[in-house]
Amino acid sequence: MFERLRNPSRDLAIDLGTANTLVYEAGEGIVVDEPSVVALDAATGQLLAAGSDAKEMLGRAPAKVRIVRPLAAGVISDADAAERMLRYFIARSRPSRLIRPRIVVCVPSEVTGVERRALEDAAMRAGARRVDVIEEAVAAALGAGLNVHGTAGAMVVDIGGGTSDVAVTSLGGVVRAHSVRIGGHDLDDAIANHVKNEYALLLGERSAETIKTAIGSAFPMSHELTHEVRGRDLITGLPRAVTLTSGEIRRALEPHLLTICETVRSTLDSCPPELAGDVLDGGIVLTGGGAMLRGLDVRMSHELGVPVRLAEDPLTAVVTGAGTCVEDPAATRSLLSQVER
């Protein structure tokens, strides 16, 4: 009761991701974890559903319902839909409608000024009294338990739905950071394109994601897996099933995996020697949903010659790190930039 009176606004941290949106409430922890999808009335633009309910409609909605992913490659692609989605999620988590919360928003490391302003504006219009911004890779490092304020360098690779962010931190700041607009959705698209080209079979977005989860891998496995998938035959127009192997899916993902590994390599190449030595000692931490691809840590360690490990909870590391900024603003102020209106 005392906490609610002391801080009735319950400040929020939001990981507004291409695939999922997570909201962390001060004093409560993660209160929203939903897909970044909205269902709108095609005629009026009215919000019909958001999150899991909207995602269930993918590929099944009638013409009068428009299913939208408001973000692409980690940035807002539909400002109106993004604002509606944010309002919905904030309303679910905010206990007080009288006092607007301070919101910490996560952004990709190499986001442009226009893209960053769109995220800030969406949060302000959704009900924030103040918006602070933190880079996703820095938030991921905090959430993974790395000491970003220490003198030793710490390296994190956050692979989200639309972007992969790489950052080396030291003394409370980012020393080197790179971002590439490749993430889990690009891996899904690569799988769908492979099945289309090799088997003349058209897959939906959810089917491609299921294949990635079931048999996707980044490094050869001792026992290769198989998975049966159903789709529409492009020649006959009829439903058909084919059996895929983990080996062929790995080959389909290879160009994107190589790009991610090269981004990490270039970040290491640009590091000061002292920090590069710290990374060799402490290793690289992987976060984000894309980091859970089988064997990615082994593949990256094999290519870079650096120890690589998966964070304890890679899916929530970014929002947990951003949540640290609302729980202890004084200790994390140096990691943020601020927008007030």
Image (cartoon, helix red, strand yellow):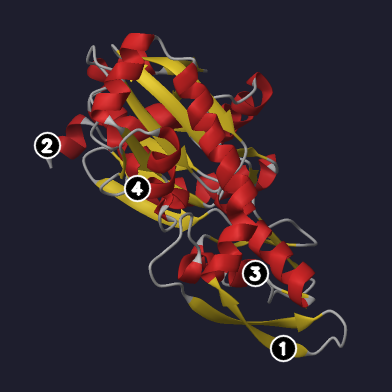
Task: Point out the tag, 2 or 1, that comes first from the N-terminus.
Answer: 2
Residue 304 located left or right of residue 144: right
The residue pinned by badge 4 equals 314
Q: Residue at x 40, y 9 (%)?
A: 272
Determine contact: label 2, label 4, CB under 8 Å: no
Task: Point out the tag, 4 or 1, that comes first from the N-terminus.
Answer: 1
Distance in Å between CA atoms under marks 3 and 4: 26 Å
Q: Point out the frontmost of discs 1 and 3.
A: 1
Q: Point out the frontmost of discs 2 and 1.
A: 1
Q: Point out the frontmost of discs 3 and 4.
A: 4
Distance in Å between CA atoms under marks 2 and 4: 33 Å
Distance in Å between CA atoms under marks 2 and 1: 61 Å
Q: Position of residue 332 (x, y in %)?
A: 29, 19
User: Is the residue 266 above or below the residue 182 in the image?
Assistant: above
Task: Point out the tag, 3 or 2, that comes first from the N-terminus.
Answer: 2
| Disc 1, SS | strand
The residue pinned by badge 1 equals 240
Determine contact: label 3, label 4, CB under 8 Å: no
| Disc 3, SS | loop
User: Is the residue 60 above or below the residue 150 in the image?
Assistant: below
The residue pinned by badge 2 equals 2
Residue 105 located left or right of residue 58: left
Task: Point out the tag, 3 or 4, that comes first from the N-terminus.
Answer: 3
The residue pinned by badge 3 equals 58
Determine contact: label 4, label 1, CB under 8 Å: no
Classify 10 Å Cα crowding around label 3: few (below 14), some (14-19), many (20 and above).
some
Going by the numbered disc 4, the residue's amino acid type is Pro
Task: Point out the tag, 2 or 4, that comes first from the N-terminus.
Answer: 2
